[in-house]
Amino acid sequence: MTMTTKPSGTVAGSEPATARRWRSRRRPSASRKLRRAGWLMVAPALGHSILWIAIPVLATLVLSFTDYRVISAPRWVGLDNYIEIWNDAVFRKATWNTIVYTFFTVPVSMAVAVVIAVLLNQRIVGRTLYRAAFFLPHVTATVAIAMVWLWMYNPQYGLLNGLLSIVGLPGQVWLGNPDWALWSVIIVGIWQGIGIKMLIYLAALQNIDPNLYEAASIDGASKIQQFFSVTLPMLKPATFFVFVVSIIGAFQVFDQIYVLTDGGPANATTMMTYEVYRSAFQNFRMGMACAQSVVLFAFLIVLTVVNRRLTGGDDT
């Protein structure tokens, strides 16, 4: 009778251990499959971000150290563009105008948007129509809005001067007077920015637990006390988001400046983005425009970090 021996590491009725290890190597694990599926799903967005964000940002940073005038090859100049920006009185004026514009448009429009959102969160007749009316300026082309306000600000037949004449007050050259031009643009920015902020606050209000208001009411809190003790604290994440997005939008204002004032009079309404436009497409100094864009980007980064620290963005 012949005895057969099995190779070591095997069990009767099963495949050899080496074969099992080889098969396990060939079969991808479930986690690897999930990772591959995840990378496959984010690949389009990742490719878009690399192609249209990362590469242009890197190119802008590199070109900011060059003298590039489109028709000639870039010439390395080091920090000359940044030194010129530092000594440029017009760009300093544009920076100050942008800061003033942001300082007034962002907080005022946010405050008005919160009040309107709270009112439109109540059960009132026609609230859907009111919501659409307040949101409409945000989805309307900025150029179209600027043209309407250009007519309203017209010193001869504009609506505002017409209203002033009714009450016996003299008309103003709203966009032609350096003392009034920037404030006129700020009013347009506030009016146009209310809609989207209102919508975000309205969505945040609808996520607040009604039991919080009921508990505050039982404790004897009035509606105003509930607003400051319950509503505003619960709107903190939305406020941080709205504030950051609003600052970025305010620092990038361009269309209404281009249509309303063209940066004038006497650079009274010139903004940082408008100076970038002038350098790039009027003076064809692409290297200088890139350097100005880097300065603008640095401003936005600093303001975002400061706001995150001040508002406790880590808790949102």
Image (cartoon, rainbow, N blue to C red):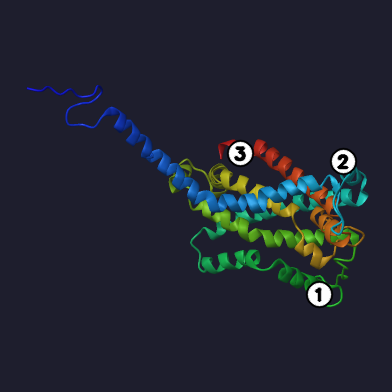
Q: Which amino acid does label 2 sit on?
A: Leu
- Tag shown at residue 33: none
Report which residue position mark 3 lands on.
313
Q: Badge 1, how many Cα within 10 Å: few under 14, some, many 20+?
A: some
Left or right, 298 with respect to 203, comes to right
Q: What residue type is labelled 3?
A: Gly
- Where residue 139 appears, as percent x and y from the top left, is 63, 66
Label 2: element kind: loop
Whether residues under marks 3 and 1 lie with C-beta atoms below 8 angstroms apart, the answer is no
Which callout, 3 or 2, points at the residue further toward the start of the chain? 2
Q: Badge 3, how many Cα within 10 Å: few under 14, some, many 20+?
A: some
Looking at the image, can residue 247 be seen?
no
- Where residue 102 appears, as percent x and y from the top left, is 75, 51
Residue 114's place in the image compared with 15, above or below, is below
Name the front one of labels 3 and 1: 3
**Separation of disc 3 and disc 2 at Cα?**
34 Å
Tell me the quadrant of the picture where the C terminus can be found.
top right
Report which residue position mark 1 lands on.
158
Looking at the image, can residue 259 be seen?
yes
Work out which residue is located at the far front of the displayed protein and give it.
Answer: 1
Label 1: element kind: loop
At horizontal 71% and vertical 51% (from top left) the residue drawn is 56
Viewer-proximal residue among 169 and 129: 129
